[in-house]
Image (cartoon, rainbow, N blue to C red):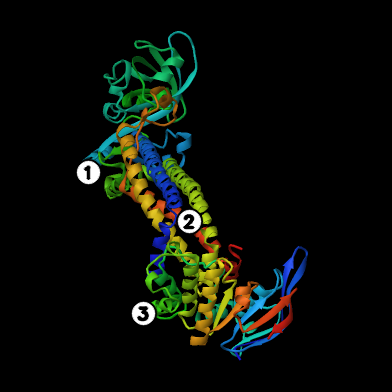
């Protein structure tokens, strides 16, 4: 076995130009994997963090609300919500009551019907979670307990609304009765994504009045202040609280919508990595196949002298892995600075583009190079070499001793 | 008797039909012979060499090596028999270019399942006149020297039979004669059986017996 390893190692240096070409292929594949996986990981991770932050790292709802969530059931609420908020805060987490409802909105004397969603929450949710104070385009944040509203940029444009205008929204109570609300537009915000920019933001009390839900909320958003990766632990901790018994407590990644994003993220990773591995492995296969064909006579002699098929495969795959090892290390060395640059500086897509995306995203996409990604890229580099060498190696096992007789004839 | 061929035939598929490369060949070869299969291209001499060297199996008839019927052996058993008892010398040498002469000879012992005895390998190279070339690689040696390494590689495991396919075809006449004289000396000194496939007069002048083939049929055996 050791002598076969020695032979395979020497074969690496047999045709320097071809080995360099194979090394360059693996190098390119590993570097592409490092950069691409870091970038996609950062992009989707940032996306999920953004969505999870705005929609609650953990949320608390009634079981009925979870069942009929798509219908936005106003009667499946938590009332009163204050004991729930207190229980969550007692465990050291931030808690925000949340209400939302579909309405038609009108500004001024003209009767226009613009369908939109109106959101009601406490000032800390708007300031600390949505960062609306930094996203003001005009005016100010809501200060009064009732009678004031903020408009998302797209909604303000649709309505032709400006700061100081009177906004009338026509919603409904939890029992289905029509319920109008009149407020003054005190500010316009650019939240950074098309869904939030088509929303109106009001105080919790305003929405509670509209829905006829005094002291209640549809959801409670919980924010631990830590990494969203620990959301399940936070949810498990909250589930032990007797004050929250009977309510559904869900980490963001336990909710269907986010699970779909998470699954999509994994699929994109898999397809991307698989595509790069496949294409670069074809390059390795090409050069290794040339190597096998060139050595037909030699392999034939080894077979004639008693070398068995598995030993032939071993010899070529080890040769490929030797080249792959060098290529992977160099590929990682090349890809890491690029990924780190993208992690630091990112790629600017522009606010206009970000505003058209249906989920909260930054206008700059950043890479996220983790140790797991670096190790994955390195191992996939080796896989590229192994896969690329395997097919030619199997081809080599089909070389029969008589081929040595016929070679060079 | 080392080899006995009884009505051996070999048929290859070709196009929609087939071609008979060998037809009803019967032969007996004794241990220690120095024998050539000769004839024009397409006469079946290489096919016959492949069959007696356990590199291929006959379509009809039987071949016995030391009383063992090769036709009853699996491909794996034939491989083991080859590794243990048969040495090969090829027209194009087919040495492993990344290994030295000594290491090329060592490979034959390892693949033959024998201990990698470097003294034995060195002696095999000394026997073929390459005492000074032990650590040279094939590209540092002449064609004649490379063929000598191939001969040492074939003989180091002391095989019952050495198969040599056109061993002088890639050598000039001087080197061809030297290599053949060496083989003849090794045949006489060590008693190894040599079977050649050739149409080279250098070989034909030195073998003790020649089996002439034409169109897959034995035409005559000299003497």
Q: Is residue A147 visible?
A: no
Q: CA distance from mark 1 to mark 3?
A: 80 Å
Assess disc 2: are there few (<14), some (14-19) or many (≥20) residues with their C-alpha within 10 Å of its C-alpha: many
Judging by the rendered image, the residue that carries numbered circle 3 is B119
Residue B81 pos. (x, y %): 54, 82
Q: Nearer the viewer, residue B76 or B27?
A: B27
Depth check, mark 1 against mark 2: the one in front is 2
- In the figure, is residue A56 to the left or right of A280? left
- Tell me, for residue A91, which label it has, or none: 1
- In the figure, is residue B40 to the left or right of B208? right
Q: CA distance from mark 1 to mark 2?
A: 52 Å
Mark 1: secondary structure: loop
Depth check, mark 1 against mark 3: the one in front is 3
Does B78 appear above or below A71?
Answer: below
Residue B148 pos. (x, y %): 48, 73
Q: Are marks 1 and 3 on the same chain?
A: no
- In the figure, is residue A109 to the left or right of B20? left
Mark 3: secondary structure: helix
Residue A281 pos. (x, y %): 48, 51
Q: Are marks 1 and 2 on the same chain?
A: yes
Q: Chain of mark 3?
A: B
Which picture quadrant has residue B8?
A: bottom right
CB under 8 Å between callouts 2 and 3? no
Residue at 73% in and 68% down: B13
Residue A91 pos. (x, y %): 22, 43
Judging by the rendered image, the residue that carries numbered circle 2 is A387
Does B208 appear above or below A70?
Answer: below
């Amino acid at each position: 076995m050791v002598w076969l390893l020695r032979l395979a190692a020497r074969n690496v240096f047999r045709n320097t130009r071809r080995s360099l070409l194979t090394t360059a292929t693996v190098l390119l594949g590993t570097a592409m994997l490092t950069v691409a996986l870091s970038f996609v990981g950062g992009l989707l991770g940032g996306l999920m963090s953004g969505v999870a932050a705005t929609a609650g790292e953990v949320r608390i709802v009634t079981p009925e609300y979870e069942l009929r969530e798509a219908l936005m059931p106003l009667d499946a609420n938590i009332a009163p919500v204050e004991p729930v908020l207190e229980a969550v805060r007692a465990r050291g987490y931030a808690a925000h009551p949340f209400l939302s409802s579909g309405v038609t909105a009108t500004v001024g004397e003209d009767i226009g019907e613009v369908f939109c969603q109106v959101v009601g929450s406490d000032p800390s949710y708007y300031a600390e979670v949505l960062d609306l104070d930094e996203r003001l385009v005009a005016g100010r944040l809501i200060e009064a307990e009732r009678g004031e509203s903020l408009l998302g940029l797209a909604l303000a444009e649709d309505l032709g609304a400006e700061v100081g205008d009177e906004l009338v929204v026509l919603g409904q109570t939890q029992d289905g009765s029509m319920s109008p609300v009149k407020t003054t537009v005190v500010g316009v915000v650019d939240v950074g994504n098309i869904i939030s920019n088509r929303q109106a933001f009001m105080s919790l009390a305003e929405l509670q009045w509209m829905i006829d839900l005094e002291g209640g909320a549809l959801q409670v958003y919980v924010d631990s202040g830590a990494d969203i990766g620990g959301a399940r632990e936070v949810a498990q901790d909250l589930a032990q609280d007797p004050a929250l018994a009977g309510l559904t407590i869900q980490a963001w990644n336990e909710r269907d919508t986010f699970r779909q994003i998470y699954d999509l993220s994994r699929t994109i990773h898999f397809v991307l990595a698989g595509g790069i591995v496949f294409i670069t492995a074809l390059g390795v296969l090409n050069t290794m196949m040339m190597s096998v064909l060139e050595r037909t006579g030699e392999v034939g002699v080894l077979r004639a002298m008693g070398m068995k098929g598995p030993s032939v495969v071993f010899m070529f795959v080890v040769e490929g892995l030797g080249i792959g090892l060098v290529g992977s290390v160099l590929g990682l060395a090349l890809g890491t600075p690029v990924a780190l640059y993208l992690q630091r500086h990112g790629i600017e897509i522009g606010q206009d583009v970000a505003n058209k995306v249906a989920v909260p995203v930054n206008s700059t996409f950043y890479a996220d190079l983790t140790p797991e990604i670096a190790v994955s890229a390195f191992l996939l580099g080796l896989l590229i070499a192994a896969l690329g060498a395997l097919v030619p190696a199997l081809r080599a096992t089909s070389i029969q001793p008589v081929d040595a007789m016929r070679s060079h004839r | 008797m080392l080899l006995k061929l009884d009505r051996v035939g070999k048929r290859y598929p070709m196009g929609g039909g087939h071609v008979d490369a060998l037809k009803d060949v019967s032969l007996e070869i004794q241990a220690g012979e120095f024998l050539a299969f000769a004839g024009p291209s397409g006469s079946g001499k290489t096919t016959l060499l492949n069959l007696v060297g356990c590199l291929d199996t006959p379509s009809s008839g039987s071949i016995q090596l030391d009383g063992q019927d090769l036709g009853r052996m699996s491909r794996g058993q034939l491989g083991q028999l080859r590794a243990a008892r048969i040495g090969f010398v090829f027209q194009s040498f087919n040495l492993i270019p990344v290994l030295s002469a000594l290491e090329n000879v060592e490979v034959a012992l390892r693949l033959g399942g024998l201990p990698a005895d470097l003294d034995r390998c060195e002696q095999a190279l000394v026997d073929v006149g390459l005492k000074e070339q032990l650590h040279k690689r094939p590209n540092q040696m002449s064609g004649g020297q490379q063929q000598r390494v191939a001969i040492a590689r074939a003989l180091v495991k002391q095989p019952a039979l050495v198969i040599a396919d056109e061993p002088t075809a890639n050598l000039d006449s001087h080197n061809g004669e030297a290599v053949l004289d060496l083989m003849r000396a090794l045949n006489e000194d060590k008693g190894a059986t040599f079977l050649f496939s050739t149409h080279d007069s250098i070989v034909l002048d030195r073998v003790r017996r020649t089996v002439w083939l034409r169109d897959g049929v034995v035409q005559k055996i000299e003497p």
